[in-house]
Amino acid sequence: MTEAAAAAAFPAAERVSVGGEEYRLVITPEQIRVRVAELGRELDRVYHGRRPVFIGVLNGAVIFLADLLRAVAFENEVDFVKISSYGAGKISSGKITELLKPTLVLRGRDVLVVEDIVDSGRSLRHLISRLEIQAPASLRVAAFLQKPEPNAADLRADFVGFPAPAGFVVGYGLDCNGLGRNLAGVYELVKTVNR
């Protein structure tokens, strides 16, 4: 069964409950599939004849990264980083912790950081400053979601899947306290469900 056939056979629910809170569908799996294919074509034009390193930001970007890798036609390598600015909950603590650093040598390489969402931009700005120390030939960012308003770090991704909804979102790798990453679409918080 193709991905499109599976999406048609198992459409995303309009509303879901994650961690006792109600969320509504705002970006469908089909919209994601189409946009990731478009991003793949954009990346093919930029990286044609080159072999970039994709650096996935764990844990949130893993699904976007996997789909993006399948959407490109050029050779590439993959590495990961893990940074955190969230404790338990939906609000950033503001303190950035590096939990995993890249293992590949990035000097002189084209690097594409793949991120789930650019919100305040602080974590991504921190990551970029750490990667720049390694002197890559180029350093770009692909974000699945980007908040449309200017962020604290004045940072815009080079490649953006979608503008991020105003509210808190889960699905397609994005989570709330570790839950909801597996949802095929993106869902925005509506209200807390009474138990």
Image (cartoon, rainbow, N blue to C red):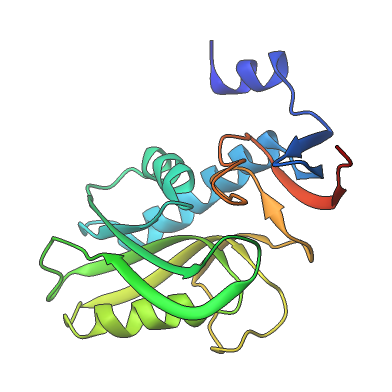
Residue farthest toward the top in the current orientation of the protein: 1
* Residue 134, picture quadrant: bottom left
Across and down, in percent, residue 194 comes to 89, 41
Q: Residue at x 63, y 35 (%)?
A: 183
Q: Residue furthest front?
A: 195
Looking at the image, residue 118 sits to the left or right of residue 148; the answer is left
Residue at 17% x, 69% y is 109
For the image shown, how many numbered marks are present on the structure? 0
- Give how far across and how far down residue 182 sits, in percent: 56, 35
Q: Residue at x 22, y 47 (%)?
A: 75
Is 73 or 159 nearer to us in this picture? 159
Q: Answer left or right for 138 relative to 157.
A: left
The one nearer the camera, 169 or 160, is 169
Q: Quadrant of the C terminus?
A: top right
Which residue is depicted at the point 38% across and 82% down? 126
Residue 118: x percent and y percent? 56, 70
Pick the front one: 38 or 79:
79
Tell me if residue 57 comes above or below residue 108 in the rendering. Answer: above
Residue 186 occupies quadrant: top right
From this view, report whether residue 22 is shown above or below residue 95: above
Residue 111 x/y as whole percent: 27, 67
Compared across the picture, whether 24 is left or right of 133 comes to right
Compared to 97, does 188 lie above or below? above
